[in-house]
Amino acid sequence: MIQLDQVLVRMSSPSDGWVLRQFLLAELGGGLADKIDWTDAAAAGGWLIAEAGGVPLGIVQLLPGKPIGRVECWRIVDGLTPREAHAVALALGRVALWSLKQLGSAVAVAVVDFRRKGLKRLLKRRFGGVVSASGNVISTWIGD
């Protein structure tokens, strides 16, 4: 059983491109995942990776801004118990919100898939989040 104190959250490095790809592969339909230079994405930073014992358990992307920063692409590995998934999401959330605050954000916004009810509940209960809008997330390839 993974406990909160066993979860380490760190910034991504260039060698983590494969980690990001694995977590986001299912989310990026239409072959978008195959068009992305994942090494470059990881090297650019802005990604937090949660792990225990060197095993990646979850990711989020930090998009700092003033006055509003964003925490996007919340992904937790499949196969964890609800309690373990909660510990991973809580660790990622704590580091993500602290980081945005240090970078000058006054408000943090996150898009949460309607199927991820546990994450929505955690953000509301543990971090004081409120539902401020609903809609769809649209992905469009704009690269070369």
Image (cartoon, grey):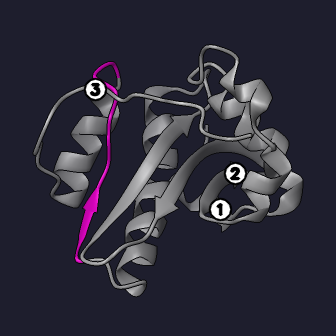
Question: What crowding class fits label 2: few (fewer than 14 Cα within 10 Å), some (14-19), or many (20 or more)?
Answer: some
Q: Please name the amino acid that badge 1 sits on.
A: Leu
Residue contact at pointers 2 and 1, CB within 8 angstroms: yes
Residue 58 image point, x, y percent: 60, 43
Q: Is residue 112 rendered to the left or right of residue 95?
A: left
Magenta stretch in the rendered image: 106-115
Residue contact at pointers 2 and 3, CB within 8 angstroms: no
Q: Is residue 74 rendered to the left or right of residue 39?
A: left
Earlier residue among tags 3 and 1: 1
Residue that label 2 marks = 51
Q: Quadrant of the C terminus?
A: top right
Q: Please name the amino acid that badge 3 sits on.
A: Lys
Give the image quarter of residue 133.
Answer: top left
* 40 shown above or below 11: above
User: Under tag 3, what secondary structure?
Assistant: helix
- The residue under the point 28% across, 26% down is 117
Q: Please name the amino acid that badge 2 sits on.
A: Glu
